[in-house]
Amino acid sequence: MTTSASTITTDHKHQKALQFIEDVTTNADQVQKKVLSEILSCNAHVEYLQRHGLDGRTDRKTFKKVMPVITYEDLRPYITRIANGDTSPILCAQPISELFVRSKAKTPGGLVARSALTAHLKERPHNAHSVNTSPLETIFCEDPYQSMYSQLRCGLCLNTQVFRVGASLAYDFITAIRFLQQHWTLLCNDIRIGTLNA
């Protein structure tokens, strides 16, 4: 039995990735402290952190002491300013160039607002080894019902080619499962008789 160089390289990459996962989960507290410190260092002088009195400090103890637990409603005024075109360092030091939402649109300030998956697929270079059972048109479809119906129908029709199923957010994965449960009979009938009901 011979082993190709690409198989060895792939196995090495997998081992390296598994070791990374092992390291960050074993040392999660240290990793979280380091990540928080890096985020605070990069964004030490943004308006939101200054307003709460962080004053450029990057230590975890001060952060926990001065920063409140918040909800989306607490951030809504800042997000609205960003969506309306304010490029000052409000929530982060770098200007925000995109907002991720359920459907593609533009904010009043001209920022592109689209789903995380759409952004990822449109911006990445074409990868010949990346194969989807669904055409990109079904993924980019702006009608959520038609998009979900079409992607699931393609996946069911080409089920022997499906190696994995995923979503960028757990919520989206649950939504797909619920859609499949609610529309199972319709999808099966459409596949059986060759019709489209999306």
Image (tube, rainbow, N blue to C red):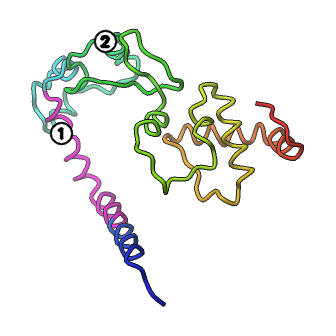
Residue at image coords 19%, 30%: 65
Main SS of residues in magenta: helix
User: Which image quadrant is residue 36 in?
Assistant: top left
Q: Specify start and end residues of the magenta stretch as a single range.
A: 17-44
Going by the numbered disc 2, the residue's amino acid type is Gly
Q: Nearer the viewer, residue 53 or 82?
A: 82
Q: CA distance from mark 1 to mark 2?
A: 31 Å
* Mark closer to the observer (1, 2): 2
Q: Which residue matches tag 1?
A: 60
Asked if residue 120 is among those painted magenta in the image, a careful observer would answer no
User: Which image quadrant is residue 142 in?
Assistant: top right
Q: Which residue matches tag 2?
A: 85
Position of 190 with respect to 141 (left or right) is right
Position of 189 with respect to 48 (left or right) is right
Q: Quadrant of the C terminus?
A: top right
Residue 141, image x and y in percent? 61, 29
Provide the secondary structure element on which disc 2 rests: loop
Q: Residues within 10 Å of mark 1 (few under 14, many from 20)?
A: some
Residue at image coords 80%, 41%: 187
Position of 32 with respect to 167 (left or right) is left
Residue 154, relative to residue 79: is it above or below? below
Going by the numbered disc 1, the residue's amino acid type is Arg
Residue 193, relative to residue 111: is it above or below? below
Check contact, mark 1 vs mark 2: CB within 8 A: no
Provide the secondary structure element on which disc 1 rests: helix
Residue 147, image x and y in percent? 65, 33
